[in-house]
Amino acid sequence: MFKVRKTVFSIAIVVCLLGLGLILAGLASGGLQDLVRSSVSSAKMAKQEETYGNIHSLNLELSNRSVIIEESPDDKVHLTYYQGDGKTSEKVTTKAENGSLYINESSFFININSGLRSLLGLINGDLERTQQITLSLPKGKSLEEVKASLANGSLSINDLTIKKLKADLSNGSIELSQSQIKSGSIESANGSIELVQTSLTDTQISLANGSITSDKLTLKGNINMSSGNGSIDLHLAEETYKAISLDLQTDLGDIELPKDMQTSHDQEDFIGDRVIHTNEQAQAKLTARTSTGSIEISH
């Protein structure tokens, strides 16, 4: 029995070495470049550009795309994306109806061609560009509602006022820059959130795996933030820092606040803490929780 196992093991090693040798020989003879050229020619992504007059709401349901919302160069709404053939890549569909813009993508699927195209796309630097959807809105534009469901992709919102935001990401980061959210619900299973010179009112943020960071963040109303595996590091705008109440808790991590902020410790041990700061003139109340991460507030 031992001899049989030894023989099988020896054959397996020989086969692996032979396969590695063939791969190296193929790369040395330009096989990788041939694969790249073949991938580009057989699965070319065609650039699509669409223009709309006016929209007041946005609905995104995407399986494998990232979205950037930014300022338009004129008074029109512009949409730019790369269209696949529906065979080796997912196909995007758009529809404008009664002031609402719908951008959808078929459910993500994996086959040999799509997997190879993604791998080669990373090699030739083309994948990130073709998997990105850009929506440009006129300066000062506000939207009544934005719903975003992204399975594998990031969401970036710049210089936009949204009355109601609902974002649900499975694998991707979120960035809000110079924007105002009047009411929001943001969830991400795997990805961080960055808030830059942004205002949040009555908003809930929940992360399973990822950190929350901010710069000059303005908060109003009831704000709830939680992270299962990640830290919360908030730099607050001065007006928010002077008019906020805090209820912060960590299961495994430290809590750091400015020295001039009066607080009470409801719980403190070697691995977790709870800190409360009460302000009778508060315009915002922040409730924040982390399971395995620290919380830091600064201004």
Image (tube, grey):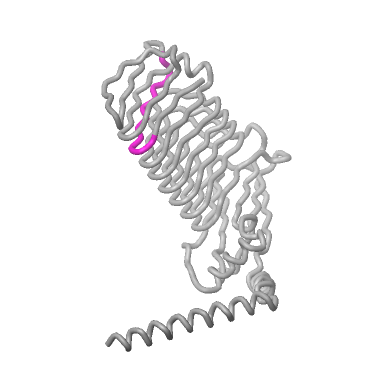
Nearest the viewer among 32 and 179 is 32
Residue at image x 54%, y 39%? 175
* Residue 55 picture quarter: top right
| Number of residue marks | 0
Q: Image height check: is 189 above or below 176?
A: below
Can you say whether 106 is above or below 208 in the image?
below
**Which residue occupies the foreground of this view, 267 or 242?**
267
Position of the N terminus by quadrant:
bottom left
The answer to whether 128 appears left or right of 279 in the picture is right
Percent x, y for residue 244?
A: 42, 18
Q: Is residue 154 magenta?
A: no
* Residue at figure coordinates x 69%, y 42% from the top left: 76
**Which x, y percent locates residue 121?**
62, 63
182 vs 295, nearest the viewer = 295
Point out the stretch of residues depicted in magenta: 282-293
Residue 90 pos. (x, y %):
54, 64
Q: Quadrant of residue 2?
A: bottom left
- Comparing 78 with 299, the one in front is 299
**Can you say whether 148 is above or below 180 in the image?**
below
* Residue lying at 26% horizontally and 24% vertically, measured from the top left: 267
